[in-house]
Each structure stands twice: as structure tokens, then as C-alpha cells.
Image (cartoon, rainbow, N blue to C red):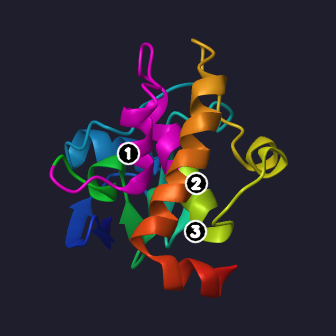
Amino acid sequence: MQVSFFINGESKSVEVADENTPLLWVVRDILDLKGTKFGCGKAACGACTLHVDGEAIRSCSYAVKFAKGKQITTIEGLGNEENPHPVQQAWIEEVVPQCGYCQPGFMMATAALLDKIPNPTDEDIDKNIINVCRCATYYRMRKAIHRAAELKTEANPITEIENS
């Protein structure tokens, strides 16, 4: 089966034997984008989080057939070394990762949260960022999420006011 979609701003068409193949494996094994991680395979841990049409989804349980025609963003498309996304910059500033395995999923979940709630409270974070970190870097992540909100507002003050 041929599936076409946009990933990180580029049009892609992939051939898959089974339309129910998880998007995670298409991203990692066919498109060779290794930033999105496999964690539990049951949509529970969030290591595989990426965006589909701006929504944070768990790609280990999202069949590739549902990606047809959609806009997908992986951690590689969020920002880059020269121009990091505010979430990536905050993660660097707050020295969030310990082992780092789960961090791409947390950053993608955070970016989606900040698009919906530009200045989240601790309660908003607790309700929306439900990924799992084995190293328990939650305190540093919470600080980074608040810092990312500040950075995003500094970068786009008018847009953020309109979204409030």
C-alpha cells in the first residue's frame, strides 16, 4: 500500500505491506528519522510522541493509514541546532535530560501543549504532559516547560497575546 503525507515540511510517499503498521516504524525504519523512540508499544509511555496535524499522538499505536495526507512533525522537524524551537532551547538551558531516551517525546508533547495553552500552570502541565521518564527528571522538565513558554512569548509576543 502506498501512503503519502508531509513530514517535517517535505512531501513523502512510502510503500508499506500492512496499512496498520504503526507510524513509528515508518518514521524510524523507512524514513530513517531516529529521534522518535520506541518505549512501550502500548501508547502509555509517550517516548514515541510526534505531531499529526498539530496534535501530539503516540505513534506506536497510530496506524500509518491514518497519516495519509496529514502534516507530521517529528523532533527532527521541531527545530535545529542553529534555530532551536523554544522547547528545545529551554531543555538545553535547564539541562533536562539524564539518559535522554524519553526526551524527544516529552519535547513534542510540550510543544503541542504550548500551542494550546501558551502559559501553562503546573496543573495544566500535570494534566497534559503524561509521558513517563524512568530517570524522573520531572522537576527539571517542569522548569523547562515554564521557560519554553517564556521563550515562545518573547519570540512572538503579539501572537501569544492573541492566543490567550
Where does label 3 land, which residue? 115
Look at the image and say whether residue 89 sits in the magenta stretch. yes
User: Where does the image place residue 87, in percent across and percent down from the top left?
Assistant: 45, 49
What's the residue type where badge 2 is placed? Ile
Q: CA distance from mark 2 to mark 1?
A: 19 Å
Placement of 78 over or under 7, stated as above or below: above
Q: Quadrant of the C terminus?
A: bottom right
Pointer 2: what residue?
57
Whichever of labels 3 and 2 marks the residue nearer the N terminus, that label is 2
Q: Which residues are magenta?
A: 82-108
In the image, is 62 to the left or to the right of 83? Answer: right
Residue drawn at x 50%, y 39% as measured from the top left: 105
Marks 3,2: beta carbons within 8 A: no
> Which image quadrant is residue 28 in?
top left
Q: Which residue is mark 1?
A: 88
* Residue 27 in picture, x, y percent from top left: 31, 48
Q: Residue at x 24, y 59 (%)?
A: 15
103 lies left or right of 131: left
- The amino acid on which the numbered mark 1 sits, given as a three-letter code, is Gln
The quarter of the picture where the N terminus appears is bottom left
Query: What is the distance, in whole Å, between disc 3 and disc 2 at their CAs?
Result: 14 Å
- Mark sitting earlier along the chain (2/1): 2
Which residue occupies 44% across, 42% down? 90
Which residue is most to the left? 82
Amino acid identity at mark 3: Asp
Residue 140 visible in image? yes
Q: Front-most of 16 and 36?
A: 36
Binning the other alpha carbons within 10 Å of mark 2 as few (below 14), some (14 to 19) or many (20 upward) gives: many
In the structure shown, which secondary structural element does the residue marked by tag 3 occupy? helix
Disc with the residue nearer the chain's start (1 vs 3): 1
